[in-house]
Structures are given as structure tokens and as C-alpha cells.
Amino acid sequence: MSCSEKKIACVNCRSSKTKCVGGDAPSFSDSNLSAAQLACERCRKSGLECIWQASKKTGRPSKTTAKAVTLDMFEAYSRGVPLIGSEDVEQVHDLVYYAALTISDNFKGLDVISDRASMLSLAEEAILTHKCDLRSIIGLIYTIHDDYGANNTEAAQYHLSYVCRVALELGLNTRSPRIDPFDDPLSSIYGRIWWEIYLLDVLLHLSTSGQIARQINSLTIIDIDANSIATDVTLQQAYDGRIKSALILSESTKIDGRLNFERVSALDTMITNQLALTQSSYHSDENFTIKELNFTSTMMLLASRVHLHRQAWFADMTFDFQSCSFRQKMSEMEMLLNDMFVMPSSGNLDASLCASLQAIRESSQQMLHWIRVDEVYQSQSASTTPPHWPFYSCCQLVASYGPILEIAILNASRNSENGVLETVAAPENGVWKTRAALSSVDLTHATLARYMKVWMIAGVYRDEVAVCRAVVDTCGPTGFGM
């Protein structure tokens, strides 16, 4: 064979810069041998597809038709976390490559077992060999999204811990990270990579109810030029909204044991202001990536508002109504003496409660509106696959909170002799309010059922909504079973 066709190593060993041992490139005489028999030692042990090719100047592996179609589809799916395009994904058969295939397999409803095994094996190798190049970090970011989507909490915690540690070691949270722009071609988007890691840290902790611990503590200094995340102006604006949404979500869901109503009011104002900007940006730009970023930012902000006011009053509220009776456990004076909260400037707790209930109701209704609009829009598109990444399922669950709270308040108001609950719910309209709320719960249940075909975690959330629906059906003869 000529020098240009001389085999050096299989694609996987070449991309990981390790010695390729025990395998050989297939030839005409090998036609009766299986792919496993031809595979090199490393690929056999790792369960990877051992691919051989001549060492070309481009260094880009040839693709099978099926893989080519899947990677072409990844260009559309990557809008949810736009870090790398399909052309760059295909450069080498490394962690990014197999993570992209796994994400695409999920969206396309294909068998993910083989590509996921390769992805997890390469993720483990990246951690054990302490890879800290930005391409490997992007691969791990995609891997963590798949971990969460597959409801693999342990793997998500493991991969997140490594990614956050490396990001801080490299100083990705600073203006002068320890990366060589000449050696790492992805150095220009290091800020975007940092914020995707930060967002993962926030979302995983929140969506698992603290089961996955925060890796980036509140004392971490973040000093990145937020105006240089992207070169494209509209993408920069969309990322500005994404960053602020992540920071607001983090702050809104903090629990410090002491309720400060002025903090709640200030955060509520910040959320509504940012919502105006992200929704305006969503409607004014037709670019699919920009719309997706603004859509997810909007849902995050609305979820932030629900959580902010939920934690202020109903922190122990569960979907089966077992832990929250909506009754005052101690007097205002006792709570003040125990330094449990800072009195609102109005001096009126009932007014603050009404305002929080209204905020939860409004935010849930807006989330349900966006879910309805998105469902109709997707039904009119050529794709039959839901397009959003797995954390969207968590937002669908949060959207159920408003209707569930509405039903709980209506039930509580029937037994309330006096107080704020009577001003919130009119008993004579209870049946119709409950039916409307149940219809909204059914909407989230149905959309989660669609998404569970893509992400296993959506099935977990759908079951939670189903439990709630079943409990409500036992509340009495109100015609709920419609």
C-alpha cells in the first residue's frame, strides 16, 4: 500500500492518542472475520466500534450512512445546548462523537445501548486520564444531559463532579482561563461552556430535590465578560437571557431558613423584568436556535417564580398533599420571636400570602400557555419527535404545581372558618375551578407521556402527576372523573 494509505491506528485510538494494539485494518482476505475479531485490544475491552481508515490529511473518519443521518439530525437537536456543530462533531470518533450520537438516538427513538456504552466508556476514560481539553468537557456536558434524561442520578453526580472540578481548575469562571488559544480551538467559547456547566449544576440539584449536591458553591467568584459569550449579536442576547435565568433560578431556590419578604418581592420583580425581555426576543427572532434558547429561558424564569413563592409559604407541599395542611402552625409573634422571617414592609402577612398565591397562579398559567403553544407548533412541523432536552420535562412538572395548589386551596377553603383562604377561593365556583385545574393537570400528563418516549425522566414526572390526579379524584363527588 502507498504511504497515504498506510494504517497507523484505528480511529478511536488515534483520537485518544493511545497506542493501538492487537488489531488490524480489514482487507479482502479478512472478509470471513467478524468486526470483533478485527478490533484492537482497547476497543474490544471498551466495547467500542473499532473503525480503521487510511491516515488522511483531514483526519476525519468516514461515516456509515446511518451514522451520517443521525449526526445530520444532531445539528437540529443541538439547539438546546448549542456548543458544537455536527461538522465539528464528526472530526474524530471520541466522547463528543458518541455523546452526540446518543443524544440523537434518544430524539429519533432509536436503540441507544451501543452508542451510550461507547459514550460512558469514553467518559470514564476522560475522567481516569484527567482530560481537561474543552472538547472533552463538552462531551461530558452532553453525557450529563443523557444521564439525567435516562434517570441515572448516580452517573450524573459522578460526571458533574468531575466537570465542575476541572472547570474551576482551568479558571473557566474567570476572564483569563488557563487554556492555550493556539492549542485548544474551542477556547473562544470557553465562557459559554462555563455557563452550561453552571446551569447543569443548578438544574440537577433542583430537579432531584437536592439528591445531587451543588458542586459550585455560592462563594465561587464568577468573573466572565457576559458580553463576549458569542460573536453573533442575537445569539449573544439569547445567551445573556440564559445566563441571567440561570443566576435567578439559583438565587430563587436558595433556602436559608429565614424568610425575607423584601427579598421575595425584589426577586419577583427581577424575574418579571427578565421575562419581558426573553419573551420579546423569542417573538422577534425566527432563528431556531435563538427561539429555543429564549423558550427554555422563559420556562426557567417562570419555574423560578413558582419556586420562589412556593418556598415562601408552602415549602413542605407535596404532590400527594400529605405534608401540607395550609394552616398556620404558630402565631406571627411566635415566628418573629424565633427570627423565622422578616416582616414585609406593608406589615400585612395576609396580603403577602395573597400576592404569592397570585404569582404562582399566573406563572403556572403562563407555563401551561407556552406548553400548549409549543405542542401545537410541533404538531405542524415535519418532525414527529419532541425537540426539547430533558430538563424541559422538569418544567412541565412545575407547570402542574399551580393547578394542584389551586385544588388544595379549594379543598382547604371548604373547612376554613375565616382567614385569607376564604378570600382566595369562592366556594360556589369550586367545582368549575377544580375542573379547569384538573384539565391543566391532564395537559401536563399528556405532554409528559409524549416526552417519555425520548427521555425516561419524563416518565418519572408523569407518574408523579398521575399520583396527584388520582388523589384529587378521591376528594369527593365533584364530577372530577370527566
Image (cartoon, rainbow, N blue to C red):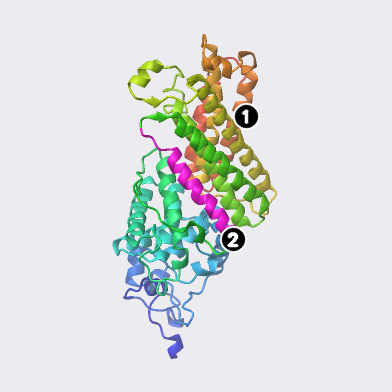
Residue type pointed to by label 1: Ser
Residue 93: image location, x then y, percent: 44, 69
Q: Assign the N terminus to one quadrant of the image.
A: bottom left
Badge 2 element:
helix
Instruction: Name the residue nearer the viewer: 182 or 63.
Output: 182
Please name the predominant secondary structure of the magenta segment in the image. Answer: helix
Q: Residue furthest top?
A: 417
Relative to 279, does residue 411 appear above or below in the rendering?
A: above
Residue 467 percent coordinates (x, y): 49, 29
Q: Position of residue 210 (x, y in %)?
A: 37, 39
* Residue 477 position by quadrant: top right
Name which residue type carries label 2: Val
**What residue is disc 2 on?**
233
Q: Is residue 35 visible?
A: yes
In the picture, the disc for residue 183 is none
The answer to whether residue 89 is above or below residue 241 is below
Residue, disc 1: 439
At 66% from the left and 42% from the top, the residue drawn is 373
Residue that lies at the very extreme toward the bottom in this rendered image: 2
With respect to residue 67, does 29 lie above or below? below
Residue 107 magenta-highlighted: no
N-terminal-most mark, 2 or 1: 2
At a point 33% along the width and 63% down the height, the residue shown is: 125
Neighbour tally class for label 2: few under 14, some 14-19, many 20 plus, Cα within 10 Å? few
- The span picked out in magenta is 234-256
- What kind of element bears circle 1? helix
